[in-house]
Image (cartoon, rainbow, N blue to C red):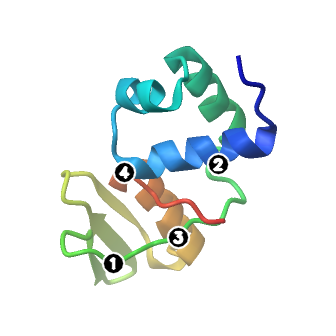
Amino acid sequence: MMKRTEREWRRLVCEFESCGRSRRDFCEVHGLSMATLDYWRRRTSTGGGGRLVQVEIEADAPTAAVLADSLVITWPNGVRVEMGAGAASAAVVGALHGAFGGGEPCSR
């Protein structure tokens, strides 16, 4: 059994979250148990607070519209968020993308 450092686990978790593979497939390729991967995903997660997220504009990116004093963001998967335009900082939009847009890229 290989002992990995916390830094190595963070790299593996980041790689998993950006690769698009299933947990089972990723774990088989890297010789991990799914329970261990899940443990490190929980341990390294900051819940979005204070974490930098990279946002990329894609062809099927969410659409945003400013209506009076509110901002409405709709993702291709059907999730719709409406908030006051003053609350729509880059950090808030980035966190929403990570939570509802799926597959946020890791920043290193």
- Spatial CA distance of label 3 from label 4 is 12 Å
Mark 2 or mark 1, earlier in chain: 2
The answer to whether 30 is drawn above or below residue 51 in the figure is: above
* Res. 57 mark: 1
Question: Which residue is found at the position 19% from the left and 69% from the top?
Answer: 60
Mark 2 or mark 3, earlier in chain: 2
Query: Is disc 1 surrounded by few (<14), some (14 to 19) or many (20+) residues within 10 Å?
Result: few
Mark 1 or mark 4, earlier in chain: 1
> SS for tag 4?
loop
Q: Nearer the viewer, residue 46 or 8?
A: 8
* Residue 78 shows up from this direction: yes
* Res. 54 mark: 3
Contact (Cβ within 8 Å) of mark 2 with mark 1: no
* Res. 2 mark: none
Q: Nearer the viewer, residue 84 or 2?
A: 2
Residue 80 is situated, as x and y percent measured from the top left of the image, at: 27, 56
The answer to whether 103 is drawn above or below residue 88 in the figure is: above
Amino acid on which the number 2 mark rests in the picture? Arg
Residue 101 is situated, as x and y percent measured from the top left of the image, at: 34, 55
Give the quadrant of residue 29.
Answer: top left
Mark 3 or mark 4, earlier in chain: 3
**Nearest to viewer (mark 4 / mark 2):** 2
- Figure label count: 4
- Spatial CA distance of label 1 from label 4 is 13 Å
The answer to whether 84 is drawn above or below residue 105 in the figure is: below
Mark 4 or mark 2, earlier in chain: 2
Contact (Cβ within 8 Å) of mark 3 with mark 1: no
Identify the residue under disc 2: 11
Give the quadrant of residue 32.
Answer: top right
Identify the residue under disc 4: 102
Amino acid on which the number 4 mark rests in the picture? Gly
Amino acid on which the number 1 mark rests in the picture? Ile
